[in-house]
Image: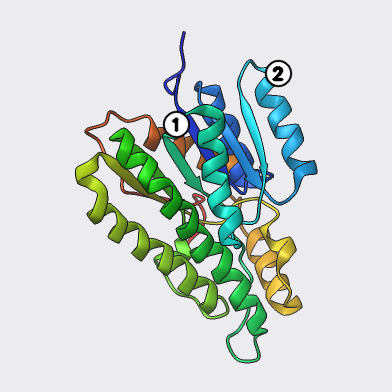
Amino acid sequence: MAGKLEGKVAIVTGASAGIGEATALALASEGAQVALAARRVERLKPVAERIESNGGKALIIVADVANETQAIDIVHKTKAEFGRIDILVNNAGVALVGDIDGANTADWRRMFDINVLGLMYVTHAALPIFKAQGSGHVVNISSVAGRTVRAGIGAYNVSKWGVNAFSEALRQEVHKQNIRVTIVEPGMVNTEINDFITDPIAKQRSEERRKSIVPLESEDVAVAIVYAVTQPLRVSVNEILIRPTDQGW
């Protein structure tokens, strides 16, 4: 049987690991052709090989979404290779958490460059294609931190609240063109995201919090994304909040 996304083309940023990798595999399993975008080509190659070994099509694009030129190239290369784009999953992101007082402000800039501006650059480049087609779907990976605030992750909170605000403003702008916008807000997920935290105290706190519960797996979030993008065109799933069962915050 044909998959629900047969003939569709998807872009997944941050596709080299975690939620991005799981989402790329899940979309491909439903028949989508997938452009895999990330900085680490050595991590993208095995993902592409898994997709292609199952009869799918994958395009590797080495890019840093924080670089506007490279972010735009993700969209242009995908369109050139596959002829269209139907789904954009803006997953690339970092959680450089830590207290506001005494923070390394370079972490703030890097986080905003990736989590907010990178997401906006890729979306901006994809919109003309979606409008010309008369359809498209933007899925922005936010976080529980985009809905709630907690001491120790203030700058990360701001970046994810920014994702939510941008997503809703975009939805209001483009819904008449059959372009759908979804934000997915995971709670704690078992990924490598803690590895990039530069503040040792914040890193320890985050690791202890993760160990205190049974976190989500990346595949759990990917299933939610597939649900959103496989709904009939008349259905726009705007927000999915997904937490581990025993996460209370």
Q: Is residue 97 visible?
A: no
Q: Which residue is mark 1?
A: 84
Residue at the (67%, 21%) spot, across then down = 52
The x and y percentages for residue 197 are 70, 69
Residue at the (39%, 35%) spot, across then down = 229
Q: Nearer the viewer, residue 240 or 173?
A: 173
- The disc, 1 or 2, on the residue closer to the chain's N-terminal end is 2
Mark 1 secondary-structure assignment: loop
In the image, taking residue 162 as reference, residue 10 lies left or right, namely right
Q: Nearer the viewer, residue 97 or 89?
A: 89
Q: Is residue 113 visible?
A: yes
* Count of numbered marks: 2
In the image, taking residue 161 as reference, residue 35 lies left or right, namely right
The x and y percentages for residue 246 are 52, 54
Looking at the image, do the residues carrying marks 1 and 2 touch, with CB atoms under 8 Å apart?
Answer: no
* Res. 198 image quadrant: bottom right
On screen, residue 234 above or below 158: above
The residue most toward the left is 176
Return the mark for residue 53: 2
Q: Nearer the viewer, mark 1 or mark 2?
A: 1
Residue at the (65%, 50%) spot, across then down = 190
Crowd class of label 1 (few under 14; some 14 to 19; many from 20; radius 10 Å): many
Marks 1/2: CA–CA distance? 23 Å
The x and y percentages for residue 53 are 70, 18
Mark 2 secondary-structure assignment: helix
The colour scheme of the drawn protein is rainbow
On screen, residue 222 above or below 167: above
Q: Amino acid at mark 2?
A: Ser
* Res. 196 image quadrant: bottom right
